[in-house]
Image (cartoon, helix red, strand yellow):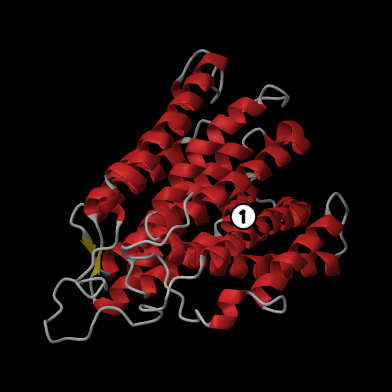
């Protein structure tokens, strides 16, 4: 990916883009925290951790999430939209895939549905949680959150198609008993997922890039419906006119972003035995483990999306949300299909009736939200209620 300067709007202009932060001194927390979190991963990998060690690793995990958001914004400031959103979405998803494969390799038959549970949780969190929070923040700030319906609609259509092909069809196919694909069907789903993902990236970054840029006025701030000509500008000015970081600073941030994300996923895996034990002790369904993993892994994207919405860049938030959902399915299914060559045990991909209803509701509500190109507090609240219903039913099916 090129780190050349851009001429359009950027995804997350940093309010604290000072000279010191651009030079990344070794004592800066954004440098120290990812390294410490990575060291915590090294020392905890493959070990049974006592309670205090789990607490320390969890603390490092939270710090790595915050550092990942910071470095993602630095890179996004340099490369502009929609590349900035793409950097974080793809990086998080690639490492999420590695986490799923690792847990499946270690867990045997009890993790047969882990890929399905985690991917579906990612879809619900991104399409309802991240979208709902972003719309809520944007509407609270300007009464109406404005975004590009063409780009967001295309992204939603891609998410819906990928979800149905990969997570719904296995429940109804008859070549194998249960919610499983046959080998040929899994191969088709993997190829179709990769093809759709590649096509979406080409449209988003090349052919119709303007569909995924924030709706802007001449001043570069997002324009909201109903704002008067003499009213307050939509943007808050946080970093609006800060000079983009140098190529060197952006490359350093890209490296630190990857370190932070590896630490996030690795530390999440380190605390996962404690999570699994807690879930089992509480008598909760195994699907809750996938929900917790998705919540941890998607924390950087959630924070980045909310911060973008606070800066009147709701389109950037939607790019992150739908881009993450597309990457989660489009990269996970092919990776899991490839991993089945050496993974033993069944691979359960098909959703149950409750989850299919929630997926259908999400698609319908999202389509009605995206179509006008603007949203109010109501739409944000509706998405968050759908997410709450999913989380509640995951605990109490």
Q: Residue at x 59, y 32 (%)?
A: 335
Q: Which is more toward the observer, 6 or 230? A: 6
In the picture of the structure, the residue carrying the numbered disc 1 is 292
Residue furthest to the left in view is 229
Q: In this rendered view, identify the residue nearer to me: 287 or 209.
A: 209
Q: Is residue 267 left or right of residue 306?
A: right
Which of 394/232 is in front? 232
Q: Is residue 396 visible?
A: no
What x and y, as percent, mark residue 164? Answer: 40, 33
The vertical placement of 188 against 56, above or below, is above
Rendering quarter of residue 50: bottom right
Q: Taking 212 as reference, is 75 left or right?
A: right
Say how many tags the image has: 1
Which residue occupies 25% across, 77% down?
A: 142
Instruction: Name the spot of residue 175 as percent of width and height, x first.
Output: 51, 12
Asked whether residue 108 appears in the rendered view, the answer is yes
x, y percent for residue 278:
74, 56
Identify which residue, 298 or 173, lies in the foreground: 298
Local packing at callout 1 (Cα closer than 10 Å; few below 14, some 14-19, many 20+) is: some
Please give left or right for residue 293 compared with residue 39 in the image: left
Indicate whether 114 appears above or below 267. Answer: above
Horizontal arrangement in the rendering, residue 34 relative to residue 163 (left or right): right
Q: Give x and y (percent) for residue 36.
A: 77, 68
Per the image, label 1 sits on a secondary structure element best described as helix
Is residue 374 positioned above or below 168 on the image?
below
Quarter-of-image position of residue 305: bottom left
Q: In percent of the image, x 63 and y 58: which residue is there?
A: 255
């Amino acid at each position: 990916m090129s780190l050349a300067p851009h001429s359009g709007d950027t995804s997350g202009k940093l309010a604290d883009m000072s000279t010191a932060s651009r030079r990344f001194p070794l004592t800066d927390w954004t440098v120290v925290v990812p390294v410490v979190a990575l060291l915590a991963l090294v020392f905890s990998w493959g070990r049974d951790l006592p309670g205090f060690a789990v607490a320390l690793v969890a603390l490092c995990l939270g710090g790595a999430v915050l550092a990942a958001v910071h470095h993602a914004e630095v890179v996004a400031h340099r490369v502009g939209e929609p590349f900035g959103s793409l950097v974080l979405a793809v990086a998080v998803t690639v490492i999420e895939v590695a986490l799923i494969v690792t847990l499946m390799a270690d867990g045997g038959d009890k993790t047969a549905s882990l890929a399905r549970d985690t991917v579906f949780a990612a879809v619900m969190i991104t399409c309802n949680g991240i979208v709902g929070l972003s719309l809520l923040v944007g509407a609270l700030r300007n009464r109406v959150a404005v975004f590009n319906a063409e780009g967001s609609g295309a992204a939603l259509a891609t998410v819906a198609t990928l979800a149905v092909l990969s997570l719904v069809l296995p429940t109804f196919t008859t070549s194998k008993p249960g919610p499983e694909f046959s080998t040929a069907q899994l191969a088709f789903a993997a190829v179709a997922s990769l093809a759709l993902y590649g096509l979406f990236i080409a449209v988003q970054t090349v052919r119709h890039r303007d569909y995924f840029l924030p709706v802007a006025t001449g001043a570069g701030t997002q324009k909201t419906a109903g704002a008067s000509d003499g009213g307050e500008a939509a943007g808050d000015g946080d970093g609006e006119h800060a000079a983009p970081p140098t190529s060197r600073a952006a490359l350093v941030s890209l490296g630190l972003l990857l370190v932070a994300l590896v630490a996030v996923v690795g530390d999440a895996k380190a605390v996962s035995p404690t999570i699994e034990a807690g879930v089992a002790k509480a008598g909760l369904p195994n699907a809750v483990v996938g929900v917790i993993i998705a919540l941890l892994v998607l924390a950087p994207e959630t924070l980045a999306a909310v911060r973008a919405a606070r800066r009147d860049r709701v389109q950037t938030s939607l790019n992150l949300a739908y881009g993450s959902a597309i990457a989660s399915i489009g990269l996970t299914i092919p990776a899991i299909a490839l991993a089945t060559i050496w993974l033993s045990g069944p691979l359960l991909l098909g959703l149950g009736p409750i989850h299919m209803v929630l997926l259908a509701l999400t698609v319908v509500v999202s389509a009605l939200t995206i179509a006008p190109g603007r949203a109010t507090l109501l739409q944000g609240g509706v998405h968050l209620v759908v997410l709450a219903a999913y989380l509640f039913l995951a605990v109490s099916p």
